[in-house]
Image (tube, rainbow, N blue to C red):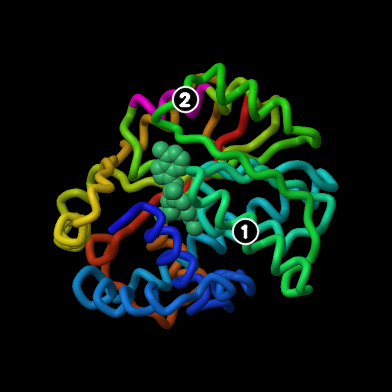
């Protein structure tokens, strides 16, 4: 499986549960190739994946929406944005900088521009930047992002991405965030904790990736311990929760016995100090 296919898969998950994800635009990305992949993932990895990804989206949607409402706008800087569509659900005082690999950014811009023209999406101020996080230095990333960042405050989102990066690149990105942001600005990040590695469902996920990685598009499988987020230079943890807790709040009828049964991701909101 190529990394960009994972972006189509999570977007399709969100479209299955619009009431939970609050993403009414995800379905624009649906396509037959991704629809064909999903039943096998739900069967061979975990049947809960679509709901959990929709809850993850809901968590960040709510946190970003209240941040931008309190500040009467600002900029969402979305690292590894994939096909996420948050900006179209926020009001038009919010600008967005979308960062991803070149093929994703080019494809997304072309499709989004056409959908705006056809009135399938509302007009928003969006800048697209192609950056490979593994290949660019802190200075290069900071200077290119500062040159297009026009509206403060910023909410940086890095969702569904650090799993595919190594620790060195993750550290580099947090240094980029520190240089871009001002006190009070926020970062939203999601990770698997190392405890997840012991679960059968995580082993099934890795097996799925290994057995479907016939494309040469190899990537890391990173988990990050909780304490990492409490030691990031220049940031304080403002909030953290996980998908297991989100299920209890938003879909209490969806029965999950324990954290070990699901691919449980942990979400953090960090505040620049
Ligand atoms: C699973 S998708 C998540 C997309 C989106 N954030 C979401 O939650 O829907 C992972 C995204 O990270 C991007 N990505 C992974 N490694 C990257 C790298 N080294 N540089 C830039 N983007 C990267 C992929 O291209 C892909 O769009």
Locate residue 132 relative to residue 96 in the image: left or right.
left
Image position, residue 67 (x, y; %): 72, 47
Locate residue 129 relative to residue 44 in the image: left or right.
right
Image position, residue 159 (x, y; %): 48, 49
Question: Which residue has dot 1 on it?
Answer: 61
Locate residue 263 relative to residue 152 in the image: left or right.
left
Label 1 lies in ligand 1 vicinity (Cβ under 8 Å)? no
Picture residue at 41% right of the left edge, 55% below the top = 4
Which segment did they paint magenta?
168-175
Instruction: In this rendered view, identify the residue nearer to me: 121 or 264.
Output: 121
Picture residue at 39% right of the left edge, 79% below the top = 254
Q: Residue furthest bottom?
A: 253
- Residue 128: which quarter of the image? top right
Q: Is residue 211 magenta?
A: no
Question: Which residue has dot 2 on it?
Answer: 136
Of labels 2 and 1, earlier in sequence is 1
Picture residue at 75% right of the left edge, 66% below the top = 116
Do residues under tags 2 and 1 come within 8 Å of each other at their CB atoms?
no
The mark found on residue 143 in the picture is none
Q: Is residue 173 magenta?
A: yes
Which dot, 2 or 1, sits closer to the camera? 2
- 209 versus 229 height, above or below: below
Estimate how packed mark 1 is, as few (under 14), some (14 to 19) or many (20 or more) residues with alpha carbons within 10 Å. many
Estimate how packed mark 2 is, as few (under 14), some (14 to 19) or many (20 or more) residues with alpha carbons within 10 Å. few
Picture residue at 64% right of the left edge, 21% below the top = 143
In this rendering, does residue 241 appear at all?
Answer: no
- Disc 1 secondary structure class: helix
Label 2 lies in ligand 1 vicinity (Cβ under 8 Å)? no
Image position, residue 221 (x, y; %): 26, 44
């Amino acid at each position: 499986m190529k990394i960009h296919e994972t972006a189509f898969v999570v977007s399709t998950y969100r479209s299955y549960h619009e009431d939970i994800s609050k993403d009414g635009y995800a379905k624009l990305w649906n396509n037959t190739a991704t629809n064909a992949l999903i039943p096998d993932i739900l069967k061979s990895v975990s049947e809960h994946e679509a709901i959990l990804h929709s809850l993850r989206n809901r968590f960040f949607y709510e946190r970003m929406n209240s941040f931008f409402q309190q500040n009467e706008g600002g900029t969402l800087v979305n690292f590894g944005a994939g096909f996420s569509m948050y900006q179209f659900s926020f009001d038009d005082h919010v600008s967005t900088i979308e960062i991803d690999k070149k093929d994703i950014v080019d494809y997304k811009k072309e499709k989004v521009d056409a959908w705006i023209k056809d009135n399938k999406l509302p007009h928003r101020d969006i800048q697209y930047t192609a950056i490979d996080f593994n290949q660019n230095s802190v200075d290069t990333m900071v200077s290119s992002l500062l040159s297009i960042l026009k509206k403060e405050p910023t909410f940086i989102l890095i969702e569904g991405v650090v799993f595919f990066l190594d620790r060195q690149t993750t550290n580099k990105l947090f240094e980029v965030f520190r240089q871009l942001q001002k006190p009070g600005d926020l970062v939203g990040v999601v990770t698997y904790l190392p405890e997840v590695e012991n679960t059968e469902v995580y082993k099934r996920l890795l097996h799925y990736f290994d057995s479907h990685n016939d494309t040469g598009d190899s990537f890391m499988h990173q988990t990050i311990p909780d304490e990492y987020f409490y030691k990031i230079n220049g940031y304080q943890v403002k909030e953290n929760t996980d998908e297991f807790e989100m299920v209890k709040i938003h879909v209490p009828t969806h029965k999950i016995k324990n954290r070990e049964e699901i691919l449980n991701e942990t979400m953090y909101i960090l505040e620049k100090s």
